Image (tube, rainbow, N blue to C red):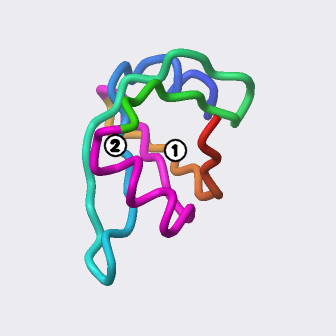
Amino acid sequence: MAAAVIAADRFPQLASIDGDQPRLRPVSPVRTDGFTVYVANLRSYHKTQEIAANPKVELCYLDDKHNQVRITGTAEIL
């Protein structure tokens, strides 16, 4: 079920932290390997700076039936 929800949502929401303020934005994963998700991002984007300062993030996937999968983890800048 979780894999189907992930596959159905092309633009999951990424939550990151900007100082003491949470930030949420849609992202477009370029590769998913189980529950490891790769998101392309330019170094100049603010979310890159947020992740460098605090790598704790959460991705939320939602399908058309409102089933959701949330992946909480630590981001790495590769």
Q: Earlier in the sequence, mark 2 or mark 1?
A: 2
Q: Looking at numbered disc 1 in the image, what kind of residue is underneath it?
A: Val
Residue at which label 2 appears: 13
Residue at the image position 37 percent from the left and 68 percent from the top = 17
In the image, residue 58 lies in the stretch drawn in magenta: yes
What is the distance, in whole Å, between disc 2 and disc 1 at their CAs? 11 Å
- Quarter of the picture containing the C terminus is top right
Q: How many marks?
A: 2
Q: Residues within 10 Å of mark 1 (few under 14, many from 20)?
A: some
Residue at the image position 27 percent from the left and 54 percent from the top = 24
x, y percentage for residue 54? 51, 68
x, y percentage for residue 63? 37, 29
Q: Is residue 16 above or below residue 12?
A: below
- Rendered image: mark on residue 59: none
Q: Looking at numbered disc 2 in the image, what kind of residue is underneath it?
A: Gln
Relative horizontal placement of residue 69, taking residue 34 as reference (left or right): left
Residue at the image position 37 percent from the left and 23 percent from the top = 28
Residue at the image position 52 percent from the left and 50 percent from the top = 70
Residue at which label 1 appears: 69
- Quarter of the picture containing the N terminus is top right
| Residue segment shown in magenta | 44-64
Q: Nearer the viewer, residue 43 or 50?
A: 43
x, y percentage for residue 55? 56, 61
Q: Nearer the viewer, residue 65 or 61?
A: 61
